[in-house]
């Protein structure tokens, strides 16, 4: 595996957040992936629209061989993981070929450190209970605060 660099997103890379948003959609075993146009739905567009211009917009990129391989980003928004108006919600995605190599953990540690340095007290997310990423979130300090049947809302105190 080549060296991974975790760094802030560059302005010209912001459009690639749409690619990562699509990658962030959890597809249960045996299910067909949705059409890519799903990211145009208002409840998903919320994660990327005008990124960098709103409160809590923070993004780190995992770069391998000079190209973005993953992204972790936050924004204060009323999404599935929303807890209050001061807590950013988190999204994370890695292209499939880079999963399971510790890159997600490195990205999570990086964004948690960055958010703490910026003065945020906690960060939240929503995850389906059957999503393998649940273990990553628990390992990096997230805890369940709400159970919504098939998914959890989790927070990490910074």
Image: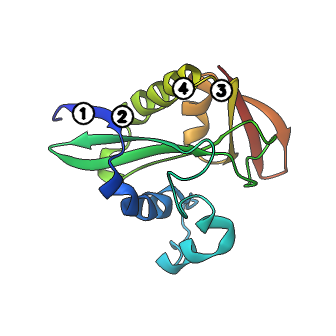
| CA neighbours of label 1 inside 10 A, class few (<14), some (14 to 19), many (20+) | some
Task: Name the residue carrying label 4.
Answer: 112
- For the residues marked 2 and 1, what is the alpha-carbon distance in whole angstroms? 8 Å
Question: Secondary structure under badge 4?
Answer: helix
At x 56% / y 69%, what residue is drawn?
31
Residue 38 vertical placement versus 46 (above, below): below
At x 14% / y 43%, what residue is drawn?
65
Answer left or right for 48 relative to 150.
Answer: left
Q: Which mark is residue 103?
A: 2
Q: Earlier in the sequence, mark 2 or mark 3?
A: 2
Q: Earlier in the sequence, mark 1 or mark 3?
A: 1
Task: Name the residue carrying label 1.
Answer: 4
| CA neighbours of label 3 inside 10 A, class few (<14), some (14 to 19), many (20+) | some
Asked whether disc 2 touches disc 1, contact meaning CB atoms under 8 Å apart, the reply is yes
Is label 2 or label 3 in front? 3
Question: Secondary structure under badge 2?
Answer: helix
Residue 98, horizontal then vertical, whole percent: 31, 45
| CA neighbours of label 2 inside 10 A, class few (<14), some (14 to 19), many (20+) | many
Question: How many marks are shown on the rendered structure?
Answer: 4
């Amino acid at each position: 595996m080549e060296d991974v660099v975790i760094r802030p997103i560059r302005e010209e890379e912001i459009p690639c957040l749409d690619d990562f948003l699509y990658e962030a959609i959890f597809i249960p075993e045996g299910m067909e992936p949705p059409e890519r146009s799903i990211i145009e739905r208002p409840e998903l567009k919320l994660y990327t629209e005008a990124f960098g211009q709103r409160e809590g917009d923070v993004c780190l990129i995992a770069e391998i061989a000079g190209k973005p391989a993953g992204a972790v980003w936050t924004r204060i928004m009323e999404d599935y993981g929303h807890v209050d108006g001061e807590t950013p919600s988190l999204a994370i995605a890695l292209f499939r070929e880079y999963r399971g190599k510790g890159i997600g953990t490195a990205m999570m540690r990086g964004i948690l450190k960055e958010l703490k340095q910026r003065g945020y007290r906690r960060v939240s997310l929503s995850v389906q209970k059957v999503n393998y990423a649940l273990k990553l979130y628990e390992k990096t300090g997230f805890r369940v605060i709400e159970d919504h049947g098939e998914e959890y809302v989790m927070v990490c105190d910074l």
